[in-house]
Amino acid sequence: MASSTRAFDLAVIGCGIVGAACARAGARAGLRTIALDREIACGGATAAGMGHIVVMDGSEAQLVLTHFSRQLWRQLIPELPEAAEYRSCGTLWIAADDEDWELARRKQAWFAARGVAGELLDAQQLTEAEPCLRPGLAGALRVPDDGVLYPPAAAQWLLRQAQNAGAEIRRGVTMTHLNEQAIHLAGGDPIAAGAIIVATGREGPELIPEIPLRPRKGHLLITDRYPDFLRHQLVELGYLRRAHAREESSVSFNLQPRATGQVLIGSSRQYSSNGGVEPAILGQMLARAQTYVPRLRALRGLRAWTGFRAATPDDLPCIGPLPQRPHIYAGLGHEGLGITTSLGTAELLMAQILGSAMPIPAEPYLPARFIAEPGTMEHV
Ligand SMILES: Cc1cc2nc3c(=O)[nH]c(=O)nc-3n(C[C@H](O)[C@H](O)[C@H](O)COP(=O)(O)OP(=O)(O)OC[C@H]3O[C@@H](n4cnc5c(N)ncnc54)[C@H](O)[C@@H]3O)c2cc1C
């Protein structure tokens, strides 16, 4: 049977939140866009994540991308449907002791120098701001413009916006391979596209083996509804140290108020590909959380689950063209920040594809940092 190739300006592979944001941006820029997923859209890590929209300062480049992306989310607030459950609750970075307090002061100064608002709360102000915390903590840095949302609903909305702007969305499509400027599908005609964005999350290496990704498992637990229990997203100040640690497994205190009144308790990090809930890790995570909020013991846990973050060696995502196959663009490796950085990723990729001005410097995130140019030595 003769095959007929359908042509698009942009094909997005993977409809998690990163692919959904890219499809929306492409269609709204006037590109004939198709977005494909081999399963349901907005499953994957997007359905498992916590939905904290946060400026993170693991590195200068991480701060720039998260800050830019948070601004984009804040601009969308008036348009987001209630189902996305966006709440501008702010983050409290909790200082347990004097050493943490010094960290809080340094973090505030670093943020302030980069235009990120934050205010220091002393112990008394912290108790007033968040009464569920145990007494005796040193204080906190409050970052008022951070927020939380419900990731699968936000991603579905981005995808609907893409559709409304003319994008074609196809689910349940298995891709066999990518070559030249076409996507080859199992049991279907090839799809030709001027640009192809690979946004397949932890499965990225199946299509782009050159990008070094490792699955990093995380546990979360959600409680029953306790509407007045928690007001802010709470994170321990040592979170970044633990999140970026190269240990095989770590837990840190991270608590989120859901719009439903539920409390989402996180989180753990493990280099593992076993997707099951591990009672020992869950126990460590809860014990850590209870050192900050002892009253958690009295709440009823409803469900625990795991998800996988796609981690790169330098904790920054890969956003941009592949040096040897420049019509293929990566939108991969967002680790624990892909909900936040999905919108910024889409803007960067659109600027690269359309040749327009970069909204922020693109270099720190280019996949080329992991991929040797033809004829050069491996550099990573
Ligand atoms: C426990 C946990 C907590 C987190 N908390 C936060 C948080 O608070 N804030 C934050 O910003 N981020 C958080 N994250 C990170 C965030 O969830 C991810 O970075 C983000 O969801 C990644 O989105 P994605 O679109 O890249 O990947 P995914 O959501 O995994 O989507 C990839 C899609 O690609 C599809 N796919 C895969 N292979 C193929 C193929 N060959 N062909 C077609 N389709 C394919 C899959 O079916 C899937 O739908 C958390 C993650 C975890 C695990």
Image (cartoon, rainbow, N blue to C red):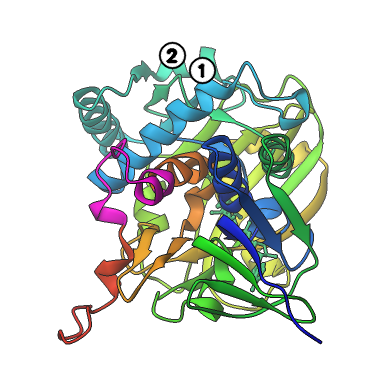
User: Residue 97 at x, y = what percent?
Assistant: 34, 35
Mark 1 to mark 2 CA distance (whole Å) = 5 Å
Q: Say which element carries label 2.
A: helix
Judge whether residue 326 is colored magenta: no
Residue visible at 33% across and 19% down? 117
Residue 249, compared with residue 304, is above or below; it is below
Frontmost residue, 174 versus 122: 174
Is 156 positioned to the left or the right of 302 in the image? left
To which residue does mark 1 refer?
127
Above/below status of 24 relative to 119: below
The residue lying toward the viewer, choosing from 355 and 217, is 355
> Secondary structure under badge 1?
helix
Q: How far from the left and from the top, in percent, is residue 75?
A: 51, 21
- Residue 35 is situated, as x and y percent measured from the top left of the image, at 66, 56
The magenta segment: 349-365
**Ligand 1: quadrant of the figure:** bottom right
The amino acid pointed to by label 2 is Gln
Provide the residue designation for mark 2: 124
Q: x, y percentage for residue 264?
A: 68, 41
- Residue 216 numbered mark, or none: none
Residue 129 seen: yes
The reply to whether discs 1 and 2 touch (Cβ–Cβ < 8 Å) is yes
Q: In this view of the protein, which residue sits in the foreground, 237 or 66?
A: 66
Q: Quadrant of the C terminus?
A: bottom left
**Residue placed farthest to the left in the image?**
376
Q: Residue at x 32, y 35 (%)?
A: 359
